Image (cartoon, rainbow, N blue to C red):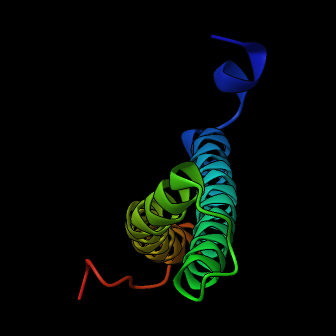
Amino acid sequence: MDMREMILPDIIVSDKNKNNVETNLCIRRKNWTNALILSAGLGIATGVAGLIINALALFGLLAENHFLKALGIWLIVVTFPLGALSAHCLDRLESIKKALKIEYCRNNGLPDEEQR
C-alpha cells in the first residue's frame, strides 16, 4: 500500500482504478481497430487480385499457367475468412464502445444501461 492509499479517502483512490478500466478499454479499442483495418484491407486486396487474375485467365489473356489460376482461386477463397474476421472486429468494437459508455456513466454518477 502506497502513501496515497493510506492518506486519501477511498473515493479518490477508486478514481485511479476507474481510469485504469477506461485505459484498458481504449487500448483494446485501438487493437481491434488495427485488426479491422488490417483484415479489411487484406480482404479487399486479395479479393480484387483474385478477381483480376481469374478474369485474365477466363478471357485467355493469361498464359496457360496452372499456378496462376490456382492462385486466383485461393485469393478469392482467402477473402471470405478475412471478411468474417472484419465482421468480428466490428462486433468487438461495438461491445467496447458500449463498455466505455457504461464506464463513463459510472464515473460521472449517471444511470447506465445496466441500472435501468
**Image vertical order of residue 68 relative to residue 46, above or below:** above
Residue 85 position within the rendered picture, expressed as x and y whole percent measured from the top left: 43, 62
Viewer-nearest residue: 64 or 11: 64
**77 left or right, relative to 3:** left
Residue shown at 61% from the left, 82% from the top: 60
Between 98 and 11, the one nearer to me in the picture: 98
- Would you say 64 lies left or right of 38 here? left
Residue at 26 percent of width and 77 percent of height:
114
Residue 36 location (% of width, % of height): 60, 65
Q: Position of residue 100 (x, y in %)?
A: 54, 69
Q: Residue at x 59, y 85 (%)?
A: 55
Along the line of sight, which residue is nearer the eye, 25 or 14?
25
Q: How many marks?
A: 0
Specify the farthest residue to the top: 1
Q: Looking at this view, name the residue that lies furthest to the right.
A: 3
Q: Residue 4, relative to residue 102: is it above or below?
A: above
In front: 73, or 6?
A: 73
**22 left or right of 112 in image:** right
**On-image quarter of the C terminus:** bottom left
**Residue in the image at 42% along x and 74% along y:** 87
Q: Position of residue 79 (x, y in %)?
A: 48, 67
Q: Is residue 4 above or below residue 62?
A: above
Q: Quadrant of the N terminus?
A: top right
